[in-house]
Image: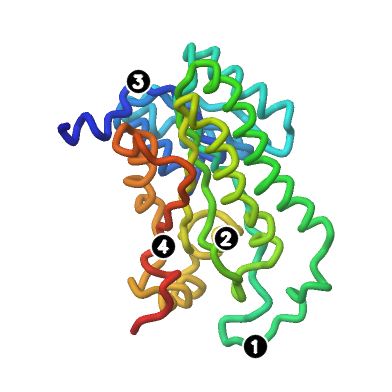
């Protein structure tokens, strides 16, 4: 098979939640630039307008919808409307997520009392579970209804390397909110495999995006995480695009229930 056929996503009806910036926008951009029909869903109205305009200016078939993934009825409505708009829904990137702030250790490895387990506010924990766990589940649930009926589809979850190990520089509520995603992916994948629906996850390490107020876009914060990586740098949104195209295209036609790490070697440990 030619590489053009392997990675062909032309015409695929695609929905990206949290798609107005960062990893979500990178996925939307990769799909749009290669001929997919893309709906970007995001809670940030200004960023949403900017993202849609940018891709439309490049000739993309792109539309935007406002969506808070903690509103389950709204998630189902957006998925249903997207399927109705295109006549089907082929690819869903369940990407929307938020940060839980820094971990219990500072970069100098001193302890941060504000981030101690017993001092974490209930509101933070609840919000992270609502967005990062329940929001993903509701998105998958809504997409599965259509994909099962049409007997085809790809669901791609944005997970994290924090599902593989404990963290000291990343907030505990974030890690906990993401912890169930890998089992969620496996469970949904085995149920939907017989319907030709593939469910996989991308597990990024530290990436410079707007999450957490864009903390890792700050050179001083980023330099610490750069030094932790064997690649001597954290990820950039465009680094995710090859993996996004792979999982959305025929190139990954026999892969389901997988979580693919994309972290520049961060989970391997420090090198030099």
- Mark 2 or mark 4, earlier in chain: 2
| Residue at x 71% of width, y 81% of height | 112
Q: x%, y% of residue 198?
A: 46, 34
Question: What's the distance in space between the residues labelled 1 and 3, CA to CA?
Answer: 52 Å
Nearer the observer: mark 2 or 3; the answer is 2
Labels 1 and 4: the sequence-earlier one: 1
Name the one closer to the observer, 15 or 196. Answer: 196
Q: Earlier in the sequence, mark 2 or mark 3?
A: 3
Q: Tag on residue 163?
A: 2
Q: From the image, state whether disc 2 or disc 4 is nearer to you.
A: 2
Dot 1, how many residues are within 10 Å of its Cα: few (below 14), some (14-19), or many (20+)?
few
Circles 1 and 3 in contact, beta carbons < 8 Å = no
Q: Which mark is residue 110?
A: 1
Does the image show residue 140? Answer: yes
Q: Which residue is mark 3?
A: 11
Asked whether the residues under the numbered discs 1 and 4 touch, taking CB atoms below 8 Å apart as contact, a structural biologist would say no
Give me the residue at 60% from left, 72% from top.
Answer: 167
Distance from the alpha carbon under mark 1 to that under mark 4: 25 Å
* Residue on which the image places disc 4: 263
């Amino acid at each position: 098979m030619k590489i053009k056929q392997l990675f062909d996503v032309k015409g695929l009806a695609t929905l990206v939640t949290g798609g107005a910036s960062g990893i979500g926008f990178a996925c939307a951009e990769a799909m749009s630039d290669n001929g997919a029909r893309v709906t970007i869903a995001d809670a940030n109205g200004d960023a949403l307008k900017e993202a849609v305009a940018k891709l439309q200016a490049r000739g993309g078939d792109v539309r935007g919808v406002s969506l808070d993934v903690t509103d389950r009825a709204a998630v189902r409505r957006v998925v249903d409307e997207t399927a109705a708009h295109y006549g089907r829904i082929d690819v869903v990137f369940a990407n929307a997520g938020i940060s839980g702030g820094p971990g219990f250790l500072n970069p100098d490895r001193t302890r941060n009392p504000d981030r101690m387990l017993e001092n974490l506010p209930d509101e933070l924990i609840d919000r992270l579970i609502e967005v990062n766990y329940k929001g993903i589940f509701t998105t998958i649930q809504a997409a599965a209804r259509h994909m099962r009926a049409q007997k085809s589809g790809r669901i791609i979850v944005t997970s994290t390397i924090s599902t593989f190990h404990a963290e000291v520089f990343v907030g505990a509520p974030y890690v906990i909110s993401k912890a169930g995603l890998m089992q969620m992916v496996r469970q949904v994948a085995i149920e939907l495999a017989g319907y030709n629906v593939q469910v996989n996850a991308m597990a990024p390490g530290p990436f410079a995006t707007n999450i957490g107020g864009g903390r890792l876009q700050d050179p001083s914060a980023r330099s610490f995480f750069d030094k932790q990586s064997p690649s001597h740098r954290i990820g950039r949104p465009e680094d995710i695009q090859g993996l996004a195209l792979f999982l959305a295209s025929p190139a990954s036609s026999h892969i389901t229930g997988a979580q693919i790490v994309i972290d520049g070697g961060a989970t391997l440990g420090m090198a030099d």
